[in-house]
């Protein structure tokens, strides 16, 4: 099949966590956020906001809140992409209608809208030769992140995005085999034993041979460690406080 420039860009993805001193211009930042704005949105609600952060002080604070992820501080521009229904409350109030965002559905809608915006932004940045990494670590302490950024009710920070010119060239991290993730017509789990074993071999080799942070590991071991504990148990209460998950 023809490898278009867009397909090459998408399929050469790797997260970048080290950046050169090269500045990202204001025009480039505008173009990156403009690309985020053109993401599709469920029912056209556009339930997101993008916070552009270049202040060294604020990046430093966010790096700490994200679990001491130094690249949040070191990247030239950091974006926090939030699910945002506050503007929708303002819009609906104009028409004296009830405002119902308490169902779990709205959390999904906000998270999906936000993710589509973020990936558009990352791809736009990459088209300029930049790179970046998404940062879920900002949900470690969403309360403090919201306070720092002045986020109102009916919003929640979903992810950060570090952007800048790459100072590293990491190998691509192998993905699950196609047979494990693509199903035709109906869901088919019959190959999982074989494909997971195959993927463990591939990832073991990748972790041992990659140029940075080599280790002895496999994907299934990594996942079994990861899922052995509850992640970010505070999120439910935080979302309730922000006006979500009422029902
Ligand atoms: C929503 C989201 C949140 C993420 N959060 C972090 C993070 O906090 N810190 C980090 O170093 N990488 C983070 N990542 C990057 C993933 O670790 C990375 O995408 C994954 O390991 C695959 O590697 P690759 O992107 O280089 O292919 C995040 C990715 C996504 C999509």
Image (cartoon, grey):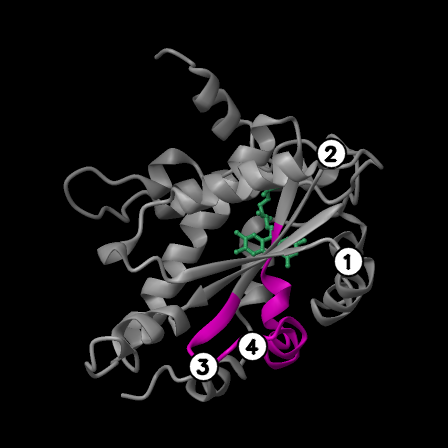
Q: Residue 74 placed where, x, y %?
A: 81, 50
142 in the magenta segment: yes
Q: Of marks 3 and 1, which one's residue comes earlier in the chain?
A: 1
Q: CA distance from mark 2 to mark 3?
A: 34 Å
Q: CA distance from mark 2 to mark 4?
A: 31 Å
Residue behind mark 4? 232
What's the residue at 33%, 70% (across, down)? 88
151 in the magenta segment: yes
Q: CA distance from mark 4 to mark 1?
A: 27 Å
Q: Of marks 2 and 4, which one's residue comes earlier in the chain?
A: 2
What's the residue at 46%, 73% (across, down)? 155
Q: Of marks 4 and 1, which one's residue comes earlier in the chain?
A: 1
Q: Residues within 10 Å of mark 2 (few under 14, many from 20)?
A: many
The answer to whether mark 3 and mark 1 are in CB contact below 8 A is: no
Observer-side mark, 4 or 1, equals: 1
Observer-side mark, 1 or 2, equals: 1
The stretch in magenta equals 134-157
Q: In the drawing, what numbered circle is on residue 165?
A: 2
Q: Nearer the viewer, residue 35 or 217?
A: 35
Identify the element where label 3 is drawn.
Answer: helix
The answer to whether mark 2 and mark 3 are in CB contact below 8 A is: no
Left or right, residue 228 beside residue 47? right
């Amino acid at each position: 099949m023809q490898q278009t420039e867009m397909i090459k860009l998408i399929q050469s993805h790797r997260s970048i966590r080290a950046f050169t001193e090269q500045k990202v211009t204001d025009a480039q930042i505008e173009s990156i956020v403009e690309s985020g704005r053109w993401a599709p949105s469920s029912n056209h609600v556009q339930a997101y906001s993008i916070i552009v952060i270049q202040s060294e002080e604020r990046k430093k604070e966010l790096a700490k809140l994200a679990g001491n992820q130094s690249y949040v501080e070191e990247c030239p521009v950091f974006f926090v992409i939030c699910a945002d229904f506050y503007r929708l409350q303002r819009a609906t109030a104009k028409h004296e209608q009830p405002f119902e965002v308490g169902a779990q559905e709205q959390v999904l809608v906000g998270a999906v809208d936000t993710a589509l915006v973020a990936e558009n932004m990352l791809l736009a940045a990459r088209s300029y030769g930049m790179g970046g990494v998404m940062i879920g670590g900002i949900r470690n302490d969403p309360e403090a992140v919201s306070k720092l950024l002045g986020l109102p009710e009916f919003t929640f920070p979903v992810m950060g995005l570090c952007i800048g010119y790459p100072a590293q060239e990491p190998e691509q991290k192998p993905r699950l085999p196609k047979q494990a993730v693509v199903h035709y017509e109906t869901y088919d789990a019959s190959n999982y034993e074989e494909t997971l074993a195959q993927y463990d071999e591939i990832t073991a080799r990748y972790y041992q041979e990659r140029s940075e942070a080599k280790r002895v590991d496999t994907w299934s071991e990594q996942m079994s460690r990861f899922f052995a504990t509850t992640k970010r148990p505070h999120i439910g209460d935080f979302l309730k406080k922000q006006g979500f998950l009422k029902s």
